Image: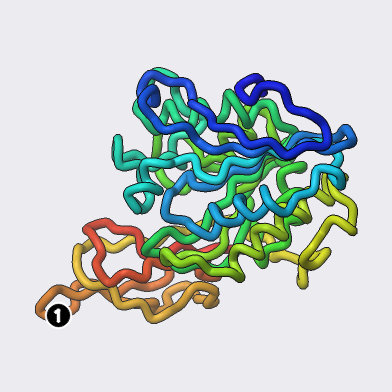
Amino acid sequence: MKILGELKPGTTQRHMIKLPGAALAKDEPRPVISVTGAKPGPVLFVNAGVHGGEYPAIEAVIRLSKALDPEKISGRVILMPCLNLPAFRRRTPFVCPIDNVNPNRVFPGNPSGSYSEQMTHALITEFVIHADAYIDLHGGDIPEALVPFVLCRAGEDGVAKKSKEIAMAFGLPYVLTITKPVQPSKGYSSYAGAAEKGIPAILAEAGGVGQMDSAAVELLVNGVKRVMQHLKMLGPEGQALGTSASTTPKVLTKFEWVYTKHAGMWYPKVAAGDVVKDGEAIGHVGDLFGDLLEKIVSPVNGVVLFLTINPSVAKEGLLMGIGVE
């Protein structure tokens, strides 16, 4: 990673990085921390803040930068607390306010594209492709609640298999393996964009609703440490908070997203983590007179992985995502 300069074994170094790209030329530098172990080993890249309002993920990377002792690490961990600084500064959910694009739908990016496309391209080319494994930390955005889960690419190739191993090692309740994007876009989510480049990768989610949830931060910090143990970068003595997941993650293979046809007030009947059945009433959308516009029913049997908790929803707005075994 030439962009970081010389990285000395047995040290933690702080860097202020200007990402390449014409659209990013006037950006403030992004903080990056390199924790270079005293012993050789793999390179793990961890970032958060692809969505600027997912605060537990950002805090987890900050805490990792303080907690990881380079003398106890084999290899190197590169940490970027927040990629999407414009959204973080302006408290903007989902998209980057400069181009109104969701960065997590345009990986691996485009060096000649919009701001978000150039930003994701820089992340991939300057950091991800130089790593042996990649973890992108997320959570429910400002209007979302969720149950913790991990995403990775499905498949039988070596990268997909290694990605699933990392996902299982992370230790959250659900692991979701999928083969195609859940929304039409110009590209992929981060984990899929990295896998396309041959890098085993996962996207881990915990926390949400614009809150600094300490339990969610701990889940994400511990998950990264478990992956480091899996990669033989960290011994059991280096795990400060629990050495293994309490239960084996449940593997899900489909992600069904539920939308409303109408703009109005959203009244869910379920919560994140609830099990739902095909055809079950899971909420309704009403107008500002209080009249019913639309009954919302589950299209599948599954578990609610995330849920829009704000009452105001737009036409064709996203209401929830359901994971299916």
Residue 28 percent across, percent down from the top left: 41, 33
Which quarter of the rendered picture does the N terminus lie within?
Answer: top right
Residue at (37% x, 47% y) in the render = 89
Residue at (59% x, 37% y) in the render = 32
Identify the residue under disc 1. 291
- How many marks the image carries: the answer is 1
Residue 235 percent across, percent down from the top left: 89, 52
Left or right: residue 324 versus residue 1 is left
Residue 72 percent across, percent down from the top left: 86, 47
Q: Amino acid at mark 1?
A: Asp
Can residue 176 be seen here? The reply is no
Left or right: residue 167 versus residue 194 is right
Q: Residues within 10 Å of mark 1 (few under 14, many from 20)?
A: few
Tell which of 290 and 101 is nearer to you.
101
Tell which of 211 and 184 is nearer to you.
211
Q: Is residue 315 above or below residue 51?
A: below
Which quarter of the rendered picture does the C terminus lie within?
Answer: bottom right
